[in-house]
Image (cartoon, rainbow, N blue to C red):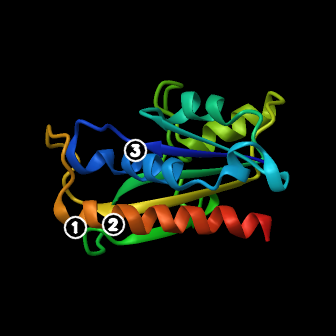
Amino acid sequence: MKTLVIGLGNPILGDDGVGWRVAEEVKRQLPSPFQGGGQGMRVDVDCLSLGGLSLMERLVGYDRAILIDAFALDEPVGSILVLKLSDLPNYSAFHTSSAHDTSLQNAIELGRSMGASLPDDIEIVGIATRRIYDFSEELSPPVAEAVPFAAGVVLDLLKQAVG
């Protein structure tokens, strides 16, 4: 099984960079059998500032994807939430939107309709944040404290797939 872990966000916009930090920590802790394709599973880890069609294109050829990102939630800052992509609202589903800003759900649907091999299993690990527009390379203390816990969640999700 080919799995792609992607940290999303912008590392110079404060807490919006948390996805990158978690992905970097996952890569650091990733057991070597996963890196080399052992145990029937290959895991690639990447950090991106993409969405919509560009993100969908990066998922081509993988069986599974775990996306890590900052979430603007009414939860305490630093809370961690795990969802399936299908559980997230598709905000552009009922609106005309350009191809430049379509939702990931719409991009996946389009990619599949064109024959792209895309993962059926897409999970989102979200970290609750408030500070996503501050120009800073630093995470706020509660979000920084969540990084090792969120990395642990991602590693647990990877281990569950091996069973």
Horizontal and vertical percent position of residue 88? 53, 60
Mark yes or no: residue 110 visible. Answer: yes
Q: Quadrant of the C terminus?
A: bottom right
Could you tell me how far apart the alpha carbons at marks 1 and 3 are, in whole angstroms? Answer: 16 Å
Q: Is residue 148 above or below residue 134?
A: below
Residue 142 shows which numbered tag? 1
**Does label 3 or label 2 sit earlier along the sequence?**
3
At label 3, which amino acid type do we have?
Trp
Q: Are marks 1 and 2 in contact (CB under 8 Å)?
A: yes
- Horizontal side, residue 128 vs residue 67: left or right: left
State the residue position of label 3: 20
| Secondary structure of the residue carrying numbered label 2 | helix
At label 2, which amino acid type do we have?
Ala
Residue 33 shows which numbered tag? none
Crowding around mark 1 (Cα neighbors within 10 Å: few <14, some 14 to 19, many 20+) is some
Could you tell me how far apart the alpha carbons at marks 1 and 2 are, in whole angstroms? Answer: 6 Å
Horizontal and vertical percent position of residue 43? 68, 46
Residue 146 shows which numbered tag? 2
Q: Looking at this rendering, what residue extends furthest in the front direction? A: 32
